[in-house]
Amino acid sequence: MSTTTTVPIRTATPTPPKREVASTREDFPILKRMIHGSPLVYLDSAATTQKPEAVINVLVDYYHQTNANVHRGLYALAAQATDKYEGARAKVAKFIGAGETEEIVFTRNTTESINLVAQSWGTKNLKSGDEILVSEMEHHSNLVPWFMLAKRTGAVVRHIPILDDGTLDLSKWNERFTNRTRLVALTHVSNVLGTINPVPEIAEMVHKHGALLLVDGAQGVPHMPVSVATLGADFVAFSAHKMLGPTGVGVLWGRRELLEAMDPFLGGGDMIRTVSMTAATWNDLPWKFEAGTPNIADVIGFGAAIDYLESIGMTEVRRHEIELTEYALEKMHSVDELEIHGPADPQLRAGVISFNHSDIHPHDLSTYLDRKGVAIRAGHHCAQPLMERLGQTATARASFYVYNNREDIDTLIDALQSAGRFFGRR
Ligand code: C6P
């Protein structure tokens, strides 16, 4: 039997002492690794971030000291595990300025959070001819669930194009947003271009016409102060692994009244209040959406990641990324063969830079850089429509986080120049 409704929700712990961003590198054991004989320079944090010792220790400690299932046991260990699990939820709520912990649903990742909305809200609320508006810069996670929903319901997916500078072409808004638009699904930050979209302004336009706004926060929440109230969205989805936390944990934040009105996404244990041989009733929020044993240890680890980020301060995280991005853009512009995508102004973009080399395919470039210990991503970045818009099949991409510094960028530039010489010789 589920005991979820009787579990007290712990309030968030006080903010830990300040940590200097310049000294964070020491906290990440993996950054001491050598790759092909060179020190690892990790520039793929948009894919997933590295984990500080503090997060790793919390995972080990949980399995050493507290491991038990949550919401079910009536013994001390189970109560402690539940307390830590729900404590992490309170930390997430505070981190994004959510009014209530009940609005925080734990999922597996951003992808699952968006699918949850498409399935639970979309199936119930959309009918044939209704429209979903996305943008040309979306990750597949914020496209495919809507295509699937459209197929089920007869709804139509339309899109806002982008301009050559990598920003949204909002001059097309009045043409693409119609009186049939029910939902706008938009990324806060592009995982390819780094573009930061003007979400609060868009939220206003969306709500003026009675539609809803889902924000893909996968690349936004980890990199700058984000308050769901300021954002003005109705749903926000993001992943723990992109913000120093473990893999396997995502968050869906939704406005309470919307979540209340939605049917469960998955059925099973913990999400029910009563079950008979013929029917079931649902648990309260947020557990209605958390069927089965959740990813307890990793959610608790995520709480430690939030503590870590708060010890730096999200304003400082953002400041550091602007500084690194500015430095990197300047240095990269000095390499003639590079075409850099996305907005020129570092204030308008997050710490992710996609680029193409005139003479070297991104895959070859990434493989070459790896030989120098530099990890960048190459490919379509799960954004094939955007690749088509850029006229590329793939780009190379360097992305930064709290543990990166100017030396990492210098190493990247040296490796890019070296690659130019190497491939130029052949
Ligand atoms: N982007 C990247 O290298 P998941 O995989 O569910 O945690 O996150 C999906 C996702 C959704 N939206 C955006 C904007 C994203 O960047 C991502 C993940 C990674 O760019 C892996 S493809």
Image (cartoon, rainbow, N blue to C red):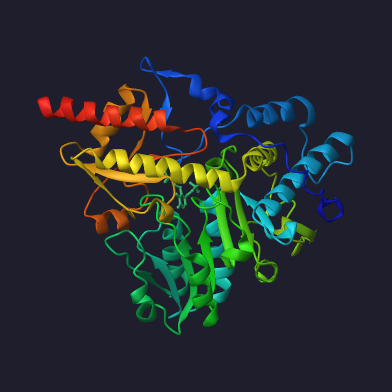
Report the number of numbered marks: 0
The answer to which image quadrant residue 14 occupies is: top right
Q: Position of residue 50 (x, y in %)?
A: 52, 33
Q: Does residue 126 appear anywhere in the picture?
A: no
Image height check: is 141 above or below 201?
Answer: above
Asked if residue 225 lies left or right of residue 357, the reply is: right
Q: Position of residue 196 (x, y in %)?
A: 44, 57
Image height check: is 57 above or below 78?
Answer: above
* Closer to us: 69 or 113: 113
- Give the residue drawn at x 72%, y 28%: 63
- Give the residue drawn at x 22%, y 37%: 335
The answer to which image quadrant residue 409 occupies is: top left
* Closer to us: 18 or 262: 18
Furthest-bottom residue in this view: 179
Q: Does residue 376 appear anywhere in the picture?
A: yes
- Give the residue drawn at x 83%, y 56%: 5
Q: Position of residue 203 (x, y in %)?
A: 52, 71
Furthest-left residue in this view: 426
Asked if residue 191 lies left or right of residue 75, the reply is: left
- Give the residue drawn at x 59%, y 68%: 234
Furthest-right residue in this view: 75
Image height check: is 331 above or below 131?
Answer: above
Q: Position of residue 30 (x, y in %)?
A: 51, 24
Asked if residue 382 lies left or right of residue 415, the reply is: right
* Closer to us: 62 or 265: 62
Q: Quadrant of the image for the C terminus?
A: top left
